[in-house]
Amino acid sequence: MNYLLRGIGVVSAVGVFSLLAFSLPSGDARGDGGYTLPKLTHKNWQQECASCHIAYPPSMLPKASWRRLMGGLDQHFGENASLDPATQADILRFLEANAADSGTSRMGSRVMRSMSPSEAPLRITETRWFVRKHDEVSRATWSRKSIGSAANCAACHRQAERGVFDEDTVRIPK
Amino acid sequence: MIKRFVCSGLAMLGTVSALAGAAETPASLMAQYAKQAGVPVSALSAERGAALYRTEHPGRNGQAVSCAGCHTANPTQAGRTRIGKRIEPLAPAANPQRFTDAAKVEKWFRRNCQDVLQRECSAQEKGDFITWLSQAK
């Protein structure tokens, strides 16, 4: 009796474990159809970066890029986005810890696979990974008023703010 | 005399709440900026604030820029950043959280005055700006 109960316990524990292991998105990849990135939380990153655009995932650029970017916030793509030094340093630490070359995400490995170690692009849209992933989008589509530019991830990736970049969540606006 | 008393009282209140890190109000910020500019709060001008908001200036890339360019002609309406993200309305009447955090207010004046005017704004201009927005309905 005791053994029977224990057996049931073991079997169901294994069952639950394997269910969890195989059904939950454990990382940042879901086949080749796009990505759901692991949920990151960092108060300053979300509050500051996301005032003007989505808080771009740190795993989409290497550390060297983030250092360049955070070192030039007073001239941030034509706008002054300067921060107080403490906030700036805090955000940079977070970006570096989760950067494409930090080895913390599969998303990052994908980006790094097509980038040489000496590269430090300032724009995610300049990475070979991004260009390849979006090669079917025409220039006319990017410049639609509803999109504006390739920097506006959320125009098509409707759940980009939550790190969801799966292809089945994409809706290109007219 | 009474007015001066009230003004300095307001200014002191502003300073005290800034030191304590307490929430500001549009009125307390107006008092602080007036004090910095060395003028009474009554010398702040909504008209000048409106002009500052609407006037277009040549931007860095030659295109005309203004506050209204992103915040729209009506500050009780939501605006849009250059990338296309929504900006909550600037006018406290439509968005009570505006002008309640001195550090945030300073951060955005520092950034946006540089972008629009290519220089910092004076304390008087900041006071005028908030005076006008506080009245926008």
Image: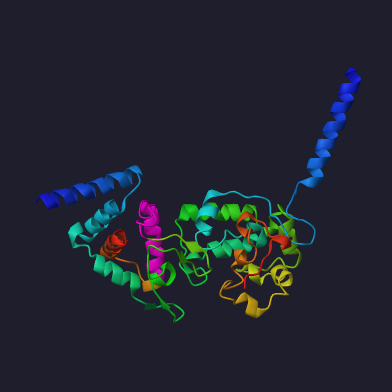
Q: How many marks?
A: 0
Residue at point 30% right, 45% down? B17
Q: Which residues are magenta?
A: B91-115
The quadrant the C terminus of chain B occupies is bottom left
Q: Is residue B31 above or below residue A156?
A: above
Q: Is residue A28 above or below residue B75?
A: above
Residue at point 73% right, 69% down? A133
Q: Is residue A137 above or below residue B21?
A: below
| Residue B66 position within the rendered picture, expressed as x and y whole percent measured from the top left | 39, 73
Residue B103 on the magenta span: yes
Q: Is residue B92 above or below residue B54?
A: above
> Is residue A6 visible from the viewing direction of this image?
yes
| Residue A28 position within the rendered picture, expressed as x and y whole percent measured from the top left | 73, 54
Task: Identify the residue at the far left of this view.
Answer: B1
The foreground one among B4 and A58 is B4
> Going by the image, does B116 lie left or right of A110?
left
